[in-house]
Amino acid sequence: MKRRGFILMSGAALLSGLLLPLRALAAVWNKAAFEATTLAGATQGLQVDKETPSADITVNAPDRAENGAVVQVEVISRIPGTEAIAIVVEHNPTPLIANFMFAKDAEPYVVTRIKMAETAEVKAIVKVGSRYFTAGKQVEVLENGCG
Amino acid sequence: MADNIKMRAQLKGDVTELKVLMTHPMETGRRKNDLDEVVPAHFIQLVTISLNGNVVTEAQWGTGISKNPYLTLHLRGAKVGDMVAVVWHDNKGQSARHEIAVTAG
């Protein structure tokens, strides 16, 4: 429900042609989750209590990344009712990379490029109502990208 | 600030493939410059994608997204000529917006 309010609010900001003031942005950005320095802290910040591994989520990333500064990751969720996909990397200084929230006209699909400090699993956490599902892909990092 | 965002939206079958490239330093706040000074954090925190004015995807980001962020997303129900807009906001209060029409793939 929090998410709905969030979408409506920024939708209103768009329609009025105004950009979101910084104070409003600070209110929506999940500071606790993004500034957490442990994976447990990040998932707690996202209010994930229990994650169930799922074969209906695909995380595509290279087996080996020469440069951890740019690692391309693709996440596909085939779970009906997917509302959000969060990307986390356990061994990064701040494990939570991104949280994508999808309205009904968007496929639960994303490709983006992330930074990785060291070899770790790139994990996707998929939100479906109040339930969370997860899948991951191990990526060997040859050069730290978190400078 | 449209030059900060390059984007393309192509209708491919039922799905519109949106590709976005943003120009942004995405500083983590941990990197040191040549003078051994810490470069302050400067990163995009919020990205909003809308189709004909309706928000379809919202992303919150931390410092772990690479410099000059890249995105591919898939939108449903768009037609050629529909308008796709991308807006980002960063932790310094800067923002950029860009809008394009969906083209045939």
Image (cartoon, helix red, strand yellow):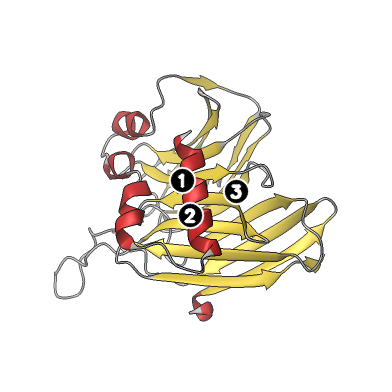
Q: Which element type, helix, strand or loop, lies under badge 2?
A: helix
The residue singled out by tag 3 in the image is A110
Q: In this rendering, is residue A113 above or below A45?
A: below
Name the image quarter holding residue B46.
bottom left
**Where is mark 2, residue-wise?**
A10
Give the image location of residue A25, x and y in percent: 35, 55
Is residue B69 visible to us here? no
Instruction: Specify which label sits upstream in the sequence, 3 or 2.
Output: 2
- Residue at mark 2: chain: A
Same chain for mark 2 and mark 1? The answer is yes
Q: Is residue A75 left or right of residue A2?
A: right
Assess disc 1: are there few (<14), some (14-19) or many (≥20) residues with their C-alpha within 10 Å of its C-alpha. some
The reply to whether discs 2 and 1 touch (Cβ–Cβ < 8 Å) is yes
Q: Residue at x 28, y 34 (%)?
A: A38
Where residue A6 is drawn, which disc sits there? 1
Q: Are marks 3 and 2 in contact (CB under 8 Å)?
A: no
Q: Residue B31 versus residue A97: which sits nearer the camera?
A: A97
Q: Secondary structure at mark 3?
A: strand
- Which residue is at a point 61% across and 58% down the rendered structure image? B50
Amino acid under label 1?
A: Phe
- Callout 3: chain: A
Mark 3: amino acid:
Val
* Label 2 Cα neighbours within 10 Å, binned few <14 / some 14-19 / many ≥20: many
For the C terminus of chain A, give its image quadrant.
bottom left
Q: Earlier in the sequence, mark 3 or mark 1?
A: 1
Viewer-side label of 3, 2: 2
Residue A46 in picture, x, y percent from top left: 39, 33
B82 to A132, vertically: above or below? below
